[in-house]
Amino acid sequence: MRTLVSPLALRSPRGRVIYWTILIVTVVGFTGAFVFPLYWMVTGALKSPDELAQIPPSFFPKHFDFKVYAEAWDQLQLGVFLKNTVLYAGGAWLFTLAVDVSAAYALSKLRPMFGKLVLGAMLATLMIPPMVLLLPTYLVAKDLPIFHADLLNTPWAIWLPAAANGFFVFLLKRFFDSIPRELLEAAEIDGASPARILWSIVLPVSRPIIGVVSILSVVTVWKDFVWPLLVLPETDKMSISVGIASLSAQMPQNVLIASLVIASLPTILVFFIFQRSIMAGLTAGSLKG
Amino acid sequence: MSVTEERIRRPHVVGATESQPPDDHGALRRAVGRNLTAYGFLCGALICFALFSWYPMIREVVLSFQQNNFVDPGVWVGFDNFKSVIADPAFRSAWLNTAVFSGMALVIGYAVPFVLAVVLNELKHAKAYLRFVVYLPVMLPPAVAVLLFKWFYDPGNGLFNQALGVVNIPPLGWLDSTNTALISLVIVSTWMNLGTGTLIYLAALQSIPGDLYESAELDGAGLFKRVRHVTIPQTRLILLVMLLLQIVATMQVFIEPYLLTGGGPENATVTVAYLMYQYAFNFGDFGGGSALGLMLMVVLLVFSTIYLRVSREEDAR
């Protein structure tokens, strides 16, 4: 497709030179700005404290001794933190899907009284950034109204608020709205209950949007810092971000860097695998979020 | 069960298929049944939203007008919390720093992604690589990215001073100096968020019809004129939306001062969100913290409202 620069201009010798110059500058610039810091992190962990401090710094570490990664794993109990984070993100994912999919289904296909009002109230929460409600939300988690339960240091402190996501309800409802009514009516005539229709007709055709919501919800919980910092203060319950941050002051620098590498591996791996869905979620999120 | 079968149908469909006019009693029962089922599906979400979104909004307002020790019932104190927070010397610094942080983040973080997207859109090679790489920092957990930069800023063995040393520039204080601390936070924040804007703009650029450029060029418009008269007008709304989103996002800045500077040196990096956190969790003053939160909420609501109007306009297109 035709873009800013015409294909004709690109074919001229001068155009070609400019194009290749810009291409090389961009590739080198991007690599330097976004990949090099990560390279520096991975190799920094392999350097001894002396080598870390030397000027000029060494581009390649002198020894490839991966013991420091094992050391970080043990000293920072990264295994525990990772297990916790998997529990929080995985549980939040399942819980969010169960809650938000059924809510969106009810609002889109069952259309109850006051449905519009409920949807409006859910979307209105998007107007208020979570940070400004941090203190009252924390107090709710500390002493749940009506139930009077203390959710601090339990996974529920992560799972329940994660499901209250107006954006997910909006995305799912918009998709469900586009499912043709005839499809559901045929099932109804066959005597299928709403739950059955949701499970065997709506869910299978909604795979793309459920994929997007799934990845967004897992990544959001995995990356979150402020909320787990407040509601999971016990060291054994911390998520990986909070755990590393709170132990960072006591660690030798190379051990800390190694733990940063380990902490960033899961998300980068997820990005490698689900790149397409993540980018789809990004554009869906930005336009209407 | 006939009630189940009818639940999902719209009223006019029901009327059209039924041979006999439904008696009032049956119609009512069906309507009640349909609503009960629907609210059964909704109840999980209603509980979650009520507890963690709707109730906190009210509680935020209540807290900011109360003195609370969470043992006895709260005491209404009028505007006392606001008065004491405003009298705090850190209050002025916090708002000033937040505004400067947002402003600087806009100067770097707003124009740069757009320029990058325009360039990326022209390139025919290495597209997948460049897109992947620019989004890589966004995928890191923010705490990891921030701690990584904390090491880069280290005056002794950080990457930045080492790089300056290689080209014979004297080392900078970065986080330790009141002059450079805030800009250092902006650099981290921009680095880890740049990819989002770039990819969103890129998606917007790809929807610009090619013949607009074609005819502009036939009219004799040069490269920069084409950017000014085709690219920017065609992406005007998304540019505006991103501007507002970015203001709202950067004004909530918390993790950078929390992990990098603790608000220092000399309050040079204390932000509104960070001061709110300090009030509640370091000073135990939830009233003062909530008052700050409420003020921030009002400011951000102004931007959110404009955002809502702009995105409606975009939907209407």
Image (spheres, coloured by chain):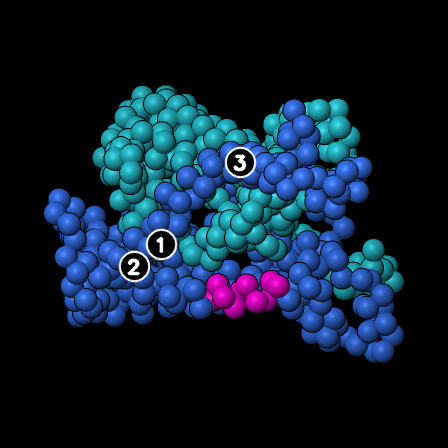
Left or right of residue B280: residue A288: right
The amino acid sitting under disc 1 is Met
Dividing the picture into quarters, in which one does residue B181 lie? bottom left
Q: Quick check: A98 above or below B145?
A: above
Which chain corresponds to the colour cyan? Answer: A
Residue A182 tag number: none
Q: How far apart are marks 3 and 1 (CA)?
A: 28 Å
| Residue of label 3 | B36
| Residue of label 2 | B61
Query: Mark 3 — on which chain does it sit?
Result: B
Q: Residues within 10 Å of mark 1 (few under 14, many from 20)?
A: many
Same chain letter for marks 3 and 1: yes
**Magenta residue span:** B303-312
- Name the colour assigned to chain B in the rendering: blue
Query: Mark 2 — on which chain does it sit?
Result: B
SS of the residue under disc 3? helix
Residue B94 drawn at (x, y percent): 28, 64
Q: Say whether marks 3 and 2 touch (CB < 8 Å).
A: no
**Magenta segment: does it hold B305?**
yes
* N-terminal-most mark, 3 or 2: 3
Q: Is residue B317 visible?
A: yes
> What main secondary structure does the magenta stretch of the protein show?
helix
Residue B79 drawn at (x, y percent): 20, 68
Q: Say whether marks 2 and 1 touch (CB < 8 Å).
A: yes
SS of the residue under disc 1? helix
